[in-house]
Amino acid sequence: MKRIVQNLFSGWFQLYRWFPTERMKAIRDLIAEGERGHAGELCFAVEARYSPFALLAGIHTRARAEQVFSALRVWDTADNSGVLLYLQLAERRVEIIADRGIAAKVPQADWDALCADFAEAMRHGAPDRAVMECLSRINALLTRHFPAAADNPKELPDEPIIL
């Protein structure tokens, strides 16, 4: 019942307050800048809330993030180097999905720590700041574990996605 109330009455009106056009441009620029230093392809997707039908079907954040990862074709890179940062606003949940090329080099514990830190940052501030901090840390992780080669192709768009 709590999830239904959260998704019916929160999230949707906060989306454009927390993520106005200028903030989305800053997120896009942060992704583009970070990708110059690593061979990963980083995507950010934010979803205001789940539909009542999705909630009744039992959707959970991890499963939804995996759906988004697939739908946005984050997996469709030459080196399997896609990473999705997915934020669901109504429930204030975050998931990071790393493709197998990245997952082979970056331990799952690092992703789990990033998600825990993101959740803590959300408790103490606005989601837009938490997203920017998390993206910076993901870029740093990828630069350390998956540095850019001389020919670093741009395989996915940098624009944040609103679902």
Image (tube, rainbow, N blue to C red):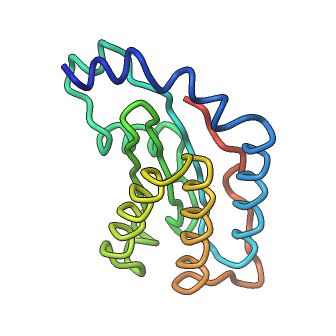
Count of numbered circles in the view: 0
The vertical placement of 87 against 51, above or below, is below
Residue positioned most to the front: 124
Tell me where residue 67 sits by quadrant. top left
Q: Residue at x 77, y 52 (%)?
A: 26
> Residue 33: x percent and y percent?
77, 67
Q: Is residue 57 left or right of residue 72?
A: left
Q: Residue at x 44, y 42 (%)?
A: 70
Tell me where residue 163 sits by quadrant. top right
The vertical placement of 128 against 16, above or below, is below
> Residue 142: x percent and y percent?
56, 76
Q: In front: 129, or 141?
A: 129
Q: Residue at x 81, y 41 (%)?
A: 22
> Residue 1: x percent and y percent?
18, 19
The vertical placement of 106 against 30, above or below, is below
Tell me where residue 29 sits by quadrant. bottom right
> Residue 60: x percent and y percent?
26, 36
Q: Is residue 53 left or right of residue 81?
A: left
Q: In front: 159, or 9?
A: 9
The vertical placement of 56 against 63, above or below, is above
